[in-house]
Image (cartoon, rainbow, N blue to C red):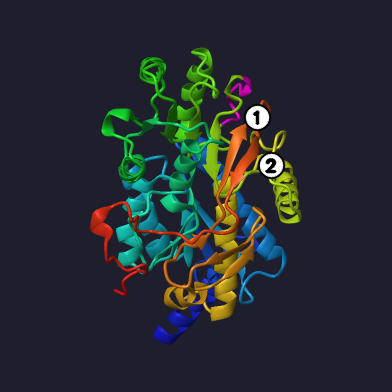
Amino acid sequence: MKTTTRRQVGQQLTALALGLAALGLAPAAMAQNTIKVGVLHSLSGTMAISESVLKDTILMEIEAINKKGGLLGKKLEAVVVDPASNWPLFAEKTRQLISQDKVSVIFGCWTSVSRKSVLPVVEELNGLLFYPVQYEGEELSKNVFYTGAAPNQQAIPAVEYLMSKDGGSAKRFVLLGTDYVYPRTTNKILRAFLKSKGIPDADIMEEYTPFGHSDYQGIIAKIKKFSAEGKKTAVVSTINGDSNVPFYKELGNQGLKATDVPVVAFSVGEEELRGVDTKPLQGHLAAWNYFMSIKNPANTEFIKKWSDYAKAKNIPGHKDKPLTNDPMEASVIGFNMWAQAVTKAKSTDTDKVIAAMAGQTFKAPSGIVSKMDEKNHHLHKSVFIGEIKADGQFNVVWKTPGPVKAQPWSPFIPENKGKKDEPEKK
C-alpha cells in the first residue's frame, strides 16, 4: 500500500510539472536550465531618473546573449527587483536575489550609499556585484567589480581642466553635492587636491542638499555672491538624481552662464538633461568616460543597438528619443566582461569568475579597448570633458591621450599611504 501511494504521488508530481511546463510555469527544479542574472536598480523614487535605463540596458544585453545561444549551453534569465531609492531595501533585495532567487551575478546600484548597503551582503554570501557608476573610491572588495570611474578618472582631471587656461583658469571653487558618502568623500579628496595646488580654504565653498531637493534659488544666489568676490569661480557638482532638473532650471533662471561661472558635473549626462531646456546651459560641463556624441564605429553600433531595442520594447522616452550615456556604457562593458569570464571559467562559480575577470578586455563604445585591471577590480578608462550643447548633447573639449588606470585609494588622503591596490582575500 505504501509503495503504491509513493508511486501515485510521483506520477501526480510528474503530471503537475509537465502541466506547469506547458503553461510556461516551470518549477524550480526545471528552472536550473537557466543562469539567473540579478538586476538591482531603482525603478521608482528619486534615483529612477538615472537608474531605470540601466535596468533596460542589462535586459538588452541578456536578450543579445540569448539570441546567440546563451552561456554554457544555458539561457540567461533576468531577475529584476526595485529597491525604490530606499538604501536599506538594497541590502534586503540583494539577500533575496542571492539566497532565494539563486542569481549568479548582480548588476546594480547607482549611489554609493546603495552600494555600501549591498556590500556586506555580497561579501557574506560570496555573491558578485557589477557597479557601473563613477564613485568616490576608498573601497575594494573581491566581490565587486567597479566599472565606473574612480576619482583620478573623473573628478581630479575635471578640476585640473577648470584650473587650466583652456578651462578658464579658475581660482575659487564651489563644491556642491547631494548629502551622502559619494559627494562628501569626493569633495574631501578635491579639497586636499586643491590645497596641494595652493588654493586656500577661504576660496572653497562647500554646500550639500538632501536627496530629492528641489529649491535651488537660495544656493545659486549664494554662488553668485561668492563668485562676485574677485577671482574666477567654478562649480563642481556632485548632485545626484532628479534634483539635477531643478538645479539646472534655476541656473538658467538666474542667468548663471558658463562664461561667468562654469559648472562641471559628475552625475549629469544625456539622460538627466532630457527634461531640461539646455539652451541657457550651453558651455557648462560634465566629466565622464563616455559621451553619446563620440564618433567611432563601436559607438555607432552601440547607439543603433540601443535605439532598435528601445523602439521594439516601447521604453518610455527612449522609443522617441533614444539616448545613451556613461553608466549605460559601463553596464555594457561589465556585462560583456562577465559573460566572457563565465565562458573562460566554464562556470558561474563566483570565485572562478572572479579569477577569470582579471585582464578581460572589451571594445568600448568610447573608442578604446577597455581593460579590467588584473588586481584592483577597476577598469582602465579614458577621461572626457564635454560642454553642454543646445540639443542636450555634449561637445568633447578635452580628453586624456589614452586609458587611465584607476587609483581606488586616493593619494590625496594621507591615511591611504601603504594601502594595497587589490582586494584582500577573505
Whether residue 357 appears in this view of the structure is yes
Give the answer, above or below, for where 263 lies relative to 228: below
Is 178 on the left or on the right of 388, as rendered? left
Q: Which mark is residue 145?
A: none
Three-letter code, disc 2: Ser
Picture coordinates of residue 357 (x, y %)?
51, 72
Which residue shows up at 40% across the image and 28% down it? 212
| Callout 1 touching callout 2 (CB < 8 Å) | yes
357 falls in the magenta region: no
Q: Which mark is residue 389?
A: 1
Label 2: which residue?
293
Any part of residue 1 in sight: no
328 shown above or below 376: above
Q: Is residue 33 left or right of residue 352?
A: right
Say which of 38 and 391 sits in front: 391
Q: Residue at x 50, y 73 (%)?
A: 358
For numbered disc 1, what is the local secondary structure? loop
**Where residue 202 appears, x then y in whole percent?**
27, 28
> Label 1 vs label 2: CA separation?
11 Å
Residue 219 position (above or below residue 116): above
In this rendering, position of residue 145 left or right of residue 361? left
> Alpha-carbon neighbours of circle 1 within 10 Å: few (<14), some, or many (≥20)?
some
* Magenta extent: 273-279
* Image quarter of the N terminus: bottom left
- The front one of 404 and 230 is 230
